[in-house]
Image (cartoon, grey):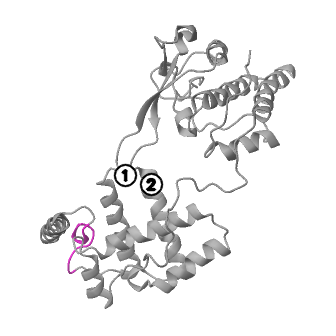
Amino acid sequence: MRDSRTECDLRSVTDLASTDGTAPGAVRLHLADGVPLLRPEEQVFEAMLDGWRNQQLARNLALSTINGRERKVRAFAAHADAFPWNWSSPLADEWFGDLRAVCGCVRSTLRGYQEAVRLFCDYATDPAYGWAGECERRFGTHPIQVCHEWNTAVHMQECEAEAPKRAFTRDELQAFFDHADDEVSRVRGRGRQGWLPAFRDAMLFKTAYAYGLRRNETRMLDTADFGRNPEGPEFGEYGVCYVRHGKAKKGSPPKRRSVLTVFDWRPRSSTSGSARSGPPCGTRTGPPYGRPNAAGASACDGWTPASPPTATTSAWMRSWTSTRCGGPTSRT
C-alpha cells in the first residue's frame, strides 16, 4: 500500500511539472518552440546537458560532482560517436569494456562512469522534462535507458581498495615523518627560503595522521579549529580538532565533527608550527599553517608537498585516501 501511494505521488508530481514546464531542466526552459536550429543535433545535446546541470543544482549537489558527471557523459558520447537519442545498450557495453580492458579503470572508477550515464539517461527519458518528446519531434527517435542491472557493476562491499594497498607499519610511519623533518634541515642548511614550506608540509602530514583527516579536511583547517578538551587538560589549546569541512552527504553541506587529541606529541608539533610558520590565515578557511600572500589568499591553497617525490612520500600520498594506520612512536 505504501509503495502504491508513493508511486502515485511521484506520478502526480511528474504530470504537474510536465504541464507547467517549470521543472528545473525542462526542455521549454532551454529550447524555444518553433525556432529552427542551425546545428540541431549539437544544440539539442548541449541544451540537454544544461538542463541536466540545472536539475542537479536544484538538488544541491556539489559543482565538482556535476562537472565530473558531465565530463563522463561527454566521454561516452564521443566514444559512441552518437547523440543520446541514438544510444543503445551495446554501445554502452562496448565503452564499459574498453574502460576496463584498454584503459585499465578500477572497479570504483568504472562504476562511477556507469552511474553518470545512467543518471543522465534517467533525466533524458523522464516525461517531466519533455526531452523524449522533443527528440521524437526533431529526429524521429528518442533517448532510452542504456544502463541496466545486467550491464552495470554493483557496489557490494564498503572497501574496494586493491589488495596491494595496506596500512603503513610503525617503522614506515616513523621513516616518513623523519624524512619530512629531515627535508626542513636539508633545505635550510643550504640557505634556501624553501625550508618554511617544507616545515609546513611536515606539520600538515602530522596533523592529517594525528586526527585521521582526509585531504580536503586537512587543506581547509584553520588555526581557530583547535580548542581545549576539559577531559584532557594536558593537551592545552590543542585538545580537540573541530573539522568543519568533512565529507558531505548527497545534497548536504560539509559534515562537521570533533576529533580528540590522543598523541602527546601533537600539541608540541602544533605549537612549534604556529610559532615558526608566521601569522595564521585569520578568518579565512585555509590550512592551519598557511600564510596570506600579497593577493590576500592563503599560500597553502592548492597545497602540494614541497618535498621531492621520494619513494616514502609517494607511497604515503597513494595510500592516504583509503588507509587508516596505527599510531607512530612518540615524537619530540
Element on which disc 2 rests: helix
| Residue nearer the viewer, 32 or 150 | 150
Picture coordinates of residue 307 (x, y %)? 76, 34
Is-magenta flag for residue 291? no
| Residue nearer the viewer, 206 or 150 | 150
Labels 1 & 2 near each other (Cβ < 8 A):
yes
Seen in the image, is 137 located left or right of residue 9?
Answer: right
x 14%, y 66%: residue: 5
- Callout count: 2
x 54%, y 28%: residue: 295
Q: Which residue is mark 2?
A: 65
Q: Which residue is mark 1?
A: 61
Q: Quadrant of the N terminus?
A: bottom left
Q: Which residues are magenta?
A: 26-34
Please say if 328 is above or below 74: above
Picture coordinates of residue 241 (x, y %)? 50, 23
